[in-house]
Image (cartoon, rainbow, N blue to C red):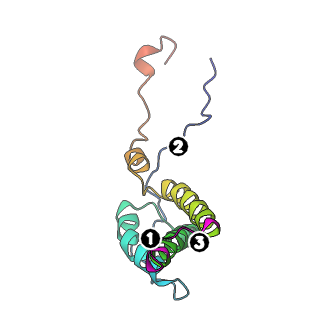
Amino acid sequence: MSIHNRGIKPALTTDDDALTKAPPVPSWLAPHAKAEWKRIMPQLITRQIITRADLAGVENYVTCIGIIRQIETDRQAIGGMIDAKLFGVLNRAAQTARQLAAEYGLTPTSRARIGNNAEADDDTDNPLAV
C-alpha cells in the first residue's frame, strides 16, 4: 500500500543550525515591520526552528505585516474610506503573510506541528518485522 503526503505539511522540528540569538532588526524595514520583527523573533529563537538561511523569509513576512498595518493606519487617518487598489495590495500582503507565518510556526496549527514528528512504533503490528 502506498502512502502519499499530498496536502499534508511535514511537522516542524528544531534545527541543528538554529539561531540562538536574535539578529538585529534590519535597518531598511519600515516601522511596523520592525515592530513585528521584535515581536516574533524571540518566539522563533526559543523554538529553535530558524536559521540564517531563513532570515530572508522572515524579512518578507514582517514586510507584509508592515504593509498591512501601514495601509490600515492610512485608511483610518482618512476617515475609514476603502481604496479598492490598496485593498487589493492589503489582501495580497495578508495572504502572503499568512502563508509565511505557517512556514515559521507562527500560527496555532503550525505551532501544534512542532515536536510532533516522533516516528510511530509500527513494529508491534507488523508480523514481518524482525
Mark 2, other Cα within 10 Å: few <14 / some 14–19 / many ≥20? few
Q: Position of residue 63 (x, y in %)?
A: 54, 73
The numbered mark at residue 109 is none
Separation (CA) of disc 3 from disc 1: 14 Å
Q: Amino acid at mark 1?
A: Leu
Is 40 placed left or right of 84 in the picture?
A: left
The first of marks 3 and 2 along the sequence is 2
Q: Is residue 45 visible?
A: yes
Is 46 placed left or right of 10 in the picture?
A: left
Query: Looking at the image, which residue sits at the far bottom?
Result: 27
Q: Quadrant of the N terminus?
A: top right
The residue singled out by tag 1 in the image is 19
Q: Amino acid at mark 3?
A: Ala
Q: The residue tagged with tag 1: helix, strand or loop?
A: loop
The residue singled out by tag 3 in the image is 56
Q: The residue tagged with tag 3: helix, strand or loop?
A: helix
Q: Position of residue 91 (x, y in %)?
A: 57, 60
Query: What segment carries the magenta color?
Result: 75-84
Q: Amino acid at mark 2?
A: Pro
The residue singled out by tag 2 in the image is 10
